[in-house]
Amino acid sequence: MNIPASGSFSHYADELLCRGFCVLPEVLNAVECRDFTAQYDREQRYRSTIDMSRYNFGSGQYRYFADPLPERVAKLRARFYELLVGAANTWSQRVNSEQHFPARFPDYEREQQGHRQTTPTPLILRYRAGDYNCLHQDISGEHYFPYQLIIALSQRGQDFEGGELVLTQQRPRMQTIPHIVKLDRGDCVIVAARHHPSAGKRGYYRSAFRHGVAQVTGGERYSLGIIFHNYASATG
């Protein structure tokens, strides 16, 4: 894993606070990506499997990891939380939230337990030709972390065609801004989970972010999702 050091992460944090998302190249190497995809069918690793078409979420499938999380997933979650917590607390100030996020991930986990949010949320998503994911937010309950990770596990143009990541930014009383993000295998996008504090003439206002996946036109596309907050109960 190629997780940035705190000092080198600062410009990504600045971009995140400015735009609501940023891209980090090659967080996972090719071997690590293949290991995740190769183990997708090991059902004992997962607590839940969701067929998107059943719930009108789109078409495709995703699986939530069971507790305890695989070591690599747990490390990504804890390390990136601690890189992002400064931006998260700036986010909280800008949206006038009273929530303050602790510096260490174990302390945040204990807070989650106090809110009875104990169901793990990291997941792997699989798309085949014709599959897509509707625009959505991965939020369940009042208490959530303002950012999340999406890591590409497949190589576009080699493993699959189409399947671009789609982000939308809905501003109050204005038209929606679309963002199309093309990730290579191992690349990571950090995206606002629900709201982004956009700068306006009178301070900051909340713009709603949603994310989804355009239709895969060929091949097979896998991605890893790292959500920092837990769910109060198993959801999909």
Image: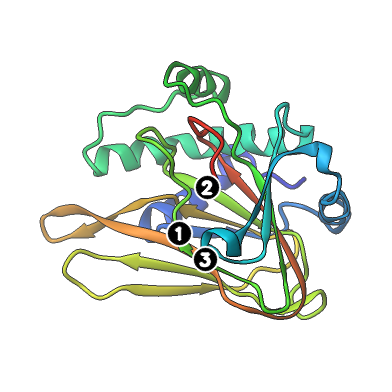
How far apart are the two marked residues, 3 and 1, measured between alpha carbons? 6 Å
Foreground residue, 55 or 115? 55
Is disc 3 in contact with disc 1, using a CB cutoff of under 8 Å? yes
Q: How is the image coloured?
A: rainbow
Instruction: Identify which amino acid the numbered label 3 is placed on.
Output: Gly
Please state if 60 lies on the left or on the right of 172 as rendered: right
Instruction: Identify which amino acid the numbered label 2 is placed on.
Output: Gln
- Circle on res. 136: 1
Q: Quadrant of the N terminus?
A: top right
Residue at 64% of width from left, 40% of height from top?
Answer: 5
Answer with mark 3 or mark 2, whichever residue precedes in sequence.
Answer: 2
Residue 203 appears at what percent x and percent y?
15, 52
**Residue 207 vertical position relative to residue 39 in the rendered view, above or below:** below
Helix, strand or loop at mark 2: strand
- Circle on res. 16: none
Helix, strand or loop at mark 3: strand
Is disc 3 in contact with disc 2, using a CB cutoff of under 8 Å? no
How far apart are the two marked residues, 1 and 2, measured between alpha carbons? 13 Å
Residue 152 appears at what percent x and percent y?
70, 61
- Quarter of the view holding residue 142: top left
- Circle on res. 212: 3
Which residue was labeled with disc 2?
Answer: 148
